[in-house]
Image (spheres, rainbow, N blue to C red):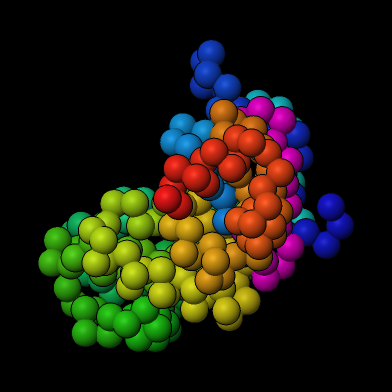
């Protein structure tokens, strides 16, 4: 797995008697977009949370940008400064303006001056198409706008890697496109991304490889073309038949 920016090796994760991840191994190279899909409860979100160490693994190891994050005493502050994560339900601070939501981590974690943090926040709001919303509060935004602010907040830390945990699943259909457009732009700019989603159109537009995860196991992985046109595993084909037709 040389040359990888993310390496997941023989990872197991249990919640009491439930095996959420079973001997999972995969990798992502710098600039690669990895699309992770599969049935609900298959372990996809747990995998992302383990990579960002929001969950601790029971067995195996994870290396992110040279940091063996599963080691006791690993520098998790550095990890989370280099890895941005966008959640299903936005996780914005309701009492802060959009600008403050994007600036706060820059000031507290990166220790940037307020003026620099605000300048970065304004630039990122332009990037995600929301320059006019800097003084709005989260309750004044649509779901799609909240998710774009969440992406801007993650990008404000200038991360090397972005993890997306079903970023469009809580959105109405008409709001999904505006979020996916931002994600596609990021992919085209060369951001390393791991995306858990059922939005197969995004996979076709931007993914380099797809990973099918079910029952906590990697069932199959391959290029987008191979997975779509000639899946090797019957379980993969059955799942694709359900969601594509």
Quarter residue 90 falls in: bottom left
Q: Which x, y percent locates residue 167?
A: 39, 56
Nearest the eye: 202 or 142: 202
In the rendered view, would you say 101 is above or below 170?
below
Measuring 17% from the left and 73% from the top, which residue is drawn there?
A: 136
Q: Farthest residue toward the left?
A: 140
Query: Could you say where residue 191 lies in the image, as x and y percent from the top left?
Result: 60, 72
Work out whether 199 lies above or below 73.
Answer: below
Q: Which residues are magenta?
A: 21-34
Q: Is residue 61 visible?
A: no
Pinpoint residue 66: horizontal percent, then vertical percent.
76, 56
Left or right: 51 in relation to 6:
left
Residue drawn at point x = 49 percent, y = 73 percent: 184
Whether residue 18 sits left or right of residue 94 in the image: it is right
Left or right side of 95 for 83? right
Q: Is residue 23 magenta?
A: yes
Instruction: Give x and y (percent) for residue 185.
Output: 49, 78
Does residue 233 lie above or below 78 as drawn? above
Comparing 212 with 76, the one in front is 212
- Residue at 57% across / 50% down in the picture? 36
């Amino acid at each position: 797995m040389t040359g990888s920016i993310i390496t997941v090796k023989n990872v197991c994760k249990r919640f009491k008697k439930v095996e959420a991840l079973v001997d999972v191994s995969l990798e992502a190279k710098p600039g690669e977009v990895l699309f992770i899909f599969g049935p609900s409860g298959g372990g996809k979100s747990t995998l992302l949370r383990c990579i960002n160490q929001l969950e601790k693994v029971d067995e195996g190891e994870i290396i992110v940008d040279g940091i063996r994050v599963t080691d006791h005493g690993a520098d998790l502050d550095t990890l989370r400064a280099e890895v941005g994560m966008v959640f299903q339900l936005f996780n914005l601070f309701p009492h802060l303006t959009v600008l403050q939501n994007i600036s706060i981590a820059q000031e507290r974690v990166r220790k940037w001056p307020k003026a620099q943090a605000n300048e970065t926040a304004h630039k990122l709001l332009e990037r995600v198409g929301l320059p006019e919303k800097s003084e709005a509060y989260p309750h004044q935004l649509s779901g799609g706008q909240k998710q774009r602010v969440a992406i801007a907040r993650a990008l404000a830390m200038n991360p090397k890697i972005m993890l997306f945990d079903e970023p469009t699943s809580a959105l109405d259909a008409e709001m999904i496109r505006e979020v996916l457009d931002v994600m596609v732009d990021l992919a085209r700019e060369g951001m390393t991304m791991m995306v858990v989603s059922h939005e197969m159109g995004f996979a076709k537009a931007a993914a380099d490889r797809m990973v099918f995860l079910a029952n906590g196991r990697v069932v199959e992985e391959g290029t987008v073309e191979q997975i779509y046109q000639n899946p090797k595993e019957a379980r993969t084909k059955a799942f694709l038949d359900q969601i594509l037709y």
